Amino acid sequence: MASKKTLKIREKREKRVRGKLTGTLERPRLSVFRSDKHIYAQVVNDAEGTTIAAASTLSKELAGKLKGIKKVDVAKEVGKLIAAHL
């Protein structure tokens, strides 16, 4: 479990970034969350409040491919998967 300080820092960062960036249908916002074990990405249309596409290392498409691969390469695979969903 993350400490309260870590969670508070994350919340401050999210508020700061969300205050500057908004996603529209023409140019949606890419939201990325990286935990110690997994990476999650989603494309968000803030005007409607909907998620257009989402991908993560827990996706069925990536389940068998990720053993023994570096984190950077795993992130690239998640990026390719979310691009394919668009």
Image (cartoon, rainbow, N blue to C red):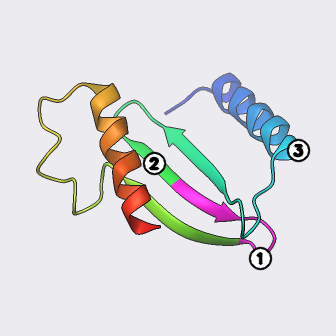
Label 3: state its secondary structure.
helix
Residue 43 falls within the magenta-colored stretch: yes
Residue 40, numbered label? 2
Q: Is residue 72 left or right of residue 5?
A: left
**Label 2 is placed on what type of residue?**
Tyr
Label 1 close to label 3 by CB (< 8 Å): no
> How far apart are the two marked residues, 1 and 3, measured between alpha carbons?
17 Å
The residue lying at 75 percent from left, 59 percent from top is 23
**Label 1 is placed on what type of residue?**
Glu
At label 2, counting other C-alpha atoms closer than 10 Å, the crowd grade (few under 14, some 14-19, many 20 or more) is: some
Label 3 close to label 2 by CB (< 8 Å): no
Q: Quadrant of residue 4?
A: top right
Q: Quadrant of residue 9?
A: top right
Label 1: state its secondary structure.
loop
Residue 48, numbered label? 1
41 over 86 or under it: above or below: above
Whole-percent x and y of residue 66? 17, 41
Q: Which residue range is magenta in the image?
A: 42-49
Comparing 11 with 16, the one in front is: 16
Whole-percent x and y of residue 50? 67, 73
Residue 19, numbered label? 3
**Label 3 is placed on what type of residue?**
Gly
> How far apart are the two marked residues, 3 and 2, measured between alpha carbons?
21 Å
